Image (cartoon, rainbow, N blue to C red):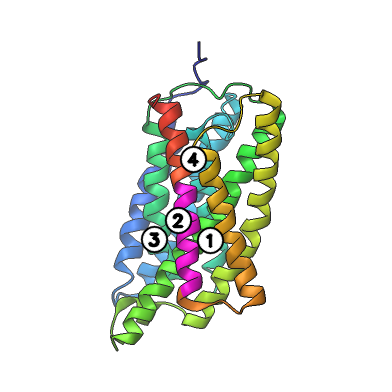
Amino acid sequence: MAAEVVTTPPQVAFYFAMISYVIASVLHLSSLAQVPAWVKHAARWAVVIAFIAHGVDIGWRGVEQVHPATSVREALGFLSWVLVGAYLVLSRRKGLSVLGAFVAPVALVVLATARLSPSGDAVTGLSSLGRLHIASATVGVAVFCLATVVSVIYLMQERNLKSKNFDGVLFRSSASLETLDRLSARLVSIGFPIFTISMMLGGVWVAQREQGFGRIEYPIAGVTWLAFAALMLGRSLRGLQGRRAALLTLLGFGAAMLVLALYFLRRSVGV
């Protein structure tokens, strides 16, 4: 019989983080238009406050023995926090604050899903190796997520240029195509070795548990790894860049999201 996952009710820090993410989302989306400079500054500070409150929430849950690697729900909450932290680092560069219009709503939805969904069953046989696998996979996917956001903005920018829509909000607010392409490549180069380590740890962990590799999540995770491996090789050996690189990034991240969705459904509602 499956053990029930250890959990704790949402605390004040969670609700404070949610409210801050809502405010940040509204302000960032508003800042895509021509608004006073204080709106953009307020949007960034709202994300900073949300990030701090979110971190306090994760820390408090850790005190209650509910760690980020305890379940898929906790991993999702940690993923959104890492995503926001990475965004805050990148947004200090000129032309990258536009990422907040994508990151803040995503963090809001993912955190709400992580904290308000059914607790479901615990991960059986969760050893230290399993925790390392889950933690490294979460960080790797969070970095891939940010690379995907950059790639989406790249594709939207490229479409604006081809249609000569020079008055579009992204065209006025975002960095150049070259900068976006380089940034996406850099993020993938950071996330790929982390995700590779998580795949290796996961393979050893599954072998130790003697449960076999028959689950559909495993080959889909392999598709994620192959997509980003092909992207890395294509960039280094063939000079792959631009639209094709962006689309391959979206493919890899889409596969990663499918894996997370399957794990989430399996643990939360037992499908």
- Tag 4: Cα neighbours inside 10 Å, few (<14), some, or many (≥20)? many
Q: Are marks 4 and 3 in contact (CB under 8 Å)?
A: no
Residue on which disc 1 sits: 88
Residue 255 in view in this figure: yes
In space, the residues marked 4 and 2 are separated at their CA atoms by 15 Å
First reached walking from the N terminus: tag 4 or tag 3:
4
- Mark 4: secondary structure: helix
Foreground tag (3 vs 1) = 3
Q: Are marks 2 and 1 in contact (CB under 8 Å)?
A: yes
Residue on which disc 3 sits: 102
Q: Amino acid at mark 2?
A: Val
Q: Which mark is residue 41?
A: none
Instruction: Place residue 161 in its image quadrant.
Output: bottom left
Residue on which disc 2 sits: 47
Number of numbered tags placed on the structure image: 4
In the displayed structure, 40 sits above or below 267; it is below
Residue 56: x and y in percent read 54, 39
Q: Is residue 143 toward the left or the right of residue 97 in the image?
A: right
In space, the residues marked 3 and 1 are separated at their CA atoms by 13 Å
Q: Which mark is residue 77?
A: 4
247 within the magenta span: yes
Quarter of the image where the C terminus is located? top left
In the displayed structure, 228 sits above or below 1; it is below
